[in-house]
Amino acid sequence: MLNQFKSHPDAWTVVDFIVIQSNDINTRFFGLSILDEAVNMRWNILDTDSKLNMRNFMVNLVLSLPEQVKGQQHATHLLTKLNATLISIVKQEWGNSWENFIQDICNSATENEAKCENALNILRLLSEEVFDFSKGKVLQSDAIILKTKMNDQFEMIYKICIQVLDNSDGVSESLVKACLKTLQAFLSWIPLQFIFDTNLMEILINKYIIPPTTRIEAIKCFTEISSLSFEEMKESPQIVQQCKERLCYYFCLLMNQIGTMTKQRSLLQEFESVAQSKQQAGFENFAK
């Protein structure tokens, strides 16, 4: 019965009623699945008003749902589906009629912690979806255009991340982790000045390498930066050299923190001390 309803071409038109009126997370998830399928399969045949209504509905839901389901069982599952459905729309509209999407999401992040955490998750998902060509969901030519647009607007994302990381004492652990994971998704391709001309790396290394709760995410961020290629800047050898020097400086900072954390034990001794523990993944990420 549910599958029959889901396959009906007009099923998406009642999703707003399903999601808003129901208090059951599974029912809401089912409604969002219908909407997601409609976006991916029928978007090009929908009229302009239908597209706009669907988009506005999703934006309002993103603004309201994180607070509504906060603390509920399986809430993360529902928000993940919500965010994925929104990204499905963004990939259709961002380059055409929704150029202020990044600004809209970043503005919502300033309202409270729940909205901020979900906004960061949306931005991370956008980076992963748009620029992972292997998924085959976005043409590389389209992704280049979207990447340029996101580069131009990354300063807004950076300001949110730095505000969270620089003032972490007053925010939840889950928000800090969401921020670090979002940064990791962006670090491989954002404008280099946000890495080498700011104090971002010092904050990451000095505040988030030692605490076990953030160590893995922080080391993954550093791994992304240490893997950067400066091929696109080969015509500016002086800038490349400056970036490489900063990278060496960051590595020295990291090794100093690792030394503090391991109490100057050797890598072999450290591996043996964390083997089979939750900290092993963090050590392995660093060793790679």
Image (spheres, rainbow, N blue to C red):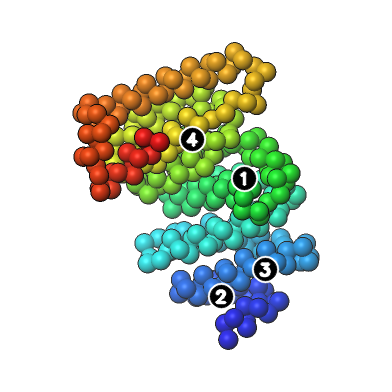
Using the rendered view, name the quadrant where residue 213 is placed. top left
Judging depth in this view, the residue of 213 and 268 nearest the camera is 268
Work out how far the residue at label 4 is from the one at label 2, CA to CA, in angstroms. 41 Å
Q: Are marks 3 and 1 in contact (CB under 8 Å)?
A: no
Work out how far the residue at label 1 is from the one at label 4, CA to CA, in angstroms. 15 Å
Look at the picture and state if 153 lies above or below 90. above
Residue tagged 3: 38
Residue tagged 1: 131
Residue tagged 2: 18
Residue at 27%, 31% (x, y): give it.
267
Q: Quadrant of the C terminus?
A: top left
Q: Quadrant of the N terminus?
A: bottom right
On screen, residue 75 versus residue 143, left or right, reads: left
Q: Position of residue 168 (x, y in %)?
A: 36, 38
Q: Position of residue 141 (x, y in %)?
A: 74, 44
Residue tagged 4: 224
Look at the picture and state if 77 lies above or below 177. below
Residue at 43%, 47% (x, y): give it.
178
Using the rendered view, name the quadrant where residue 10 is placed. bottom right
On screen, residue 100 versus residue 113, left or right, reads: right
Q: What amino acid is at disc 3? A: Ala
Q: What amino acid is at disc 1? A: Phe
Residue 98 at least partly seen: no
